[in-house]
Amino acid sequence: MIRRQLEKNIHDTLGSFPVVALLGGRQVGKTTLAKMIREALPDASIYLDLERPTDLAKLQNPESYLEMHADKTVILDEIQRIPELFPVLRALVDDDQRNGRFLVLGSASPDLIRQSSESLAGRIRYIELGPLALGEIEPTPKNTRKLWLRGGYPDSYLAASDSQSAQWREAFIKTYLERDLPALGIRIPATMLDRFWRMVAHSHGQLWNGNKIAAGLGVSNPTTKHYLDVLADTFIVRQLRPYHANLKKRLVKAPKVYLRDSGMLHALLQLEDLEDLLGHPTAGPSWEGWVIEQILALAPDNWRPWFYRTHGGAEIDLLLERPGRKAPLAFEIKRASAPTVSKGFWSTLRDLELEVGYVVCPCDEAYPLGNGVSTLPVSTLPQFMAALKDASITDLDS
């Protein structure tokens, strides 16, 4: 059993909010984590899986049933399947505002589960659970490579072989298209969305070009944007927005698009083992997207991610904007163990007046590159990000 780093956060949040929503893609481990949390509340919790007919039957009169268990933490799995429950939860919480009354699990973003936002505003806290990340596995070089190749879905990462992992991910893709999306009320032909998803995989880490993809699919640009939003709302795709500083430079306006799980990217590109991956042109962009996801999994929720690029080619892969801090943190990502950075990186640091920058790479130890920039071994990201979160404002900016 792999302990998830969010476990303590969820326990703490249940002590501060009447309703806590644990959101994340299908099969990332929400149910397992909820059951682990329940183990700490053996006599004060009840678990209902809203995909099971027997549990659904208990909620034919939800208000009466939930009132009967008002002294317990009620865990509702796959809450998006019964959106009419949200007004009931609101009424019950308004009658009794005890913290920790409900832990709800969902496979769609808060924007997609609009009923929860409208019905439980001020009463609910959202926590996102992603796939397995660095800090949740033993950080050996072998495990790091395996996590990059197979991705962080637990069943994929823990498979007995690369071949079995690839087979699991292919089955996931089929189930997601044919069952999970229709269950959310999303009516897009599975074959069309499958083609779109694979085209996005070939554009991983690139600026979004809706016109090009629309032409390839034979649909309109707004239709492709709708498809992209569906993948984003179900935790499949990340749209990384450009950072706009008040500079006299022409900056790109389109987002960069990444598949959030590297294993799903490799499955869509039919890359089964490490040899396949390292020989493929997408190895560099795949590594970049994977490292970005590792950093964001370790960063606080209120640290906002961006990328920076000018039309002249100056670029930084990731900027993390921290509340109350003027200067964002700058990360450049390289797959080489002895990385070099471009002139555009150095010029961007000067343009944005950043005194500190990091080049994340698979090196053995950190060392300075000059002018406030140093390498950051990918294996040390958990410790590095934990130190940043714990540091004072003075420490962070020094």
Image (spheres, rainbow, N blue to C red):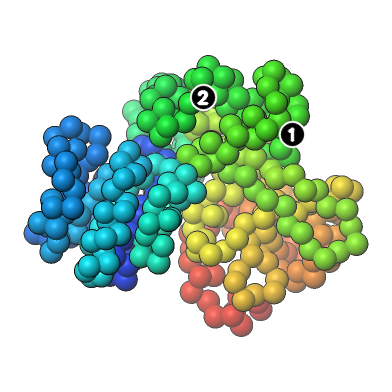
Residue 75 shown left or right of residue 147 in the figure = left
Nearest to the observer: residue 212 or residue 95: 95
**Position of 348 relative to 134 (above/below):** below
Q: Position of residue 111 (x, y in %)?
A: 49, 49
Compared across the picture, whether 331 is left or right of 392 comes to right
Q: Percent from the top left, x then y, of residue 271? A: 55, 24
Q: Of residues 99 and 83, which is closer to you in this image? A: 83
10 Å crowding of disc 2: few (<14), some (14-19), many (20+):
some
Q: Amino acid at mark 2?
A: Ile
Residue in front for this viewpoint, 98 or 15: 98
Q: Which mark is residue 325?
A: none
Are discs 2 and 1 less than 8 Å apart at CB?
no
Up the image or down, 370 lies above or below 21; here it is below
Q: Which residue is mark 1?
A: 209
Who's the residue at 64% across and 29% down the image?
Answer: 223
Write the residue at 30% across / 41% down.
82
Quadrant of the image occupied by residue 43: bottom left
Q: Position of residue 213 (x, y in %)?
A: 70, 26
The answer for how far apart the CA atoms under marks 2 and 1 are is 21 Å
Q: Can residue 31 be seen here?
A: no
Closer to the N terminus: mark 2 or mark 1?
2
Q: Position of residue 61 (x, y in %)?
A: 16, 45
- Is residue 178 found left or right of 230 in the rendered image? left
The three-letter amino acid code for the residue at tag 1 is: Asn
Q: Estimate how packed mark 1 is, as few (under 14), some (14 to 19) or many (20 or more) residues with alpha carbons within 10 Å.
A: some
Q: Quadrant of residue 202?
A: top right
Is label 1 in a helix, a strand or a loop? loop
What residue is pinned by disc 2? 188
Q: Residue at x 42, y 32 (%)?
A: 185
Quarter of the C terminus within the rendering: bottom right
Q: Assign the N terminus to one quadrant of the image.
A: top left
Residue lying at the far bottom of the rendered structure: 394
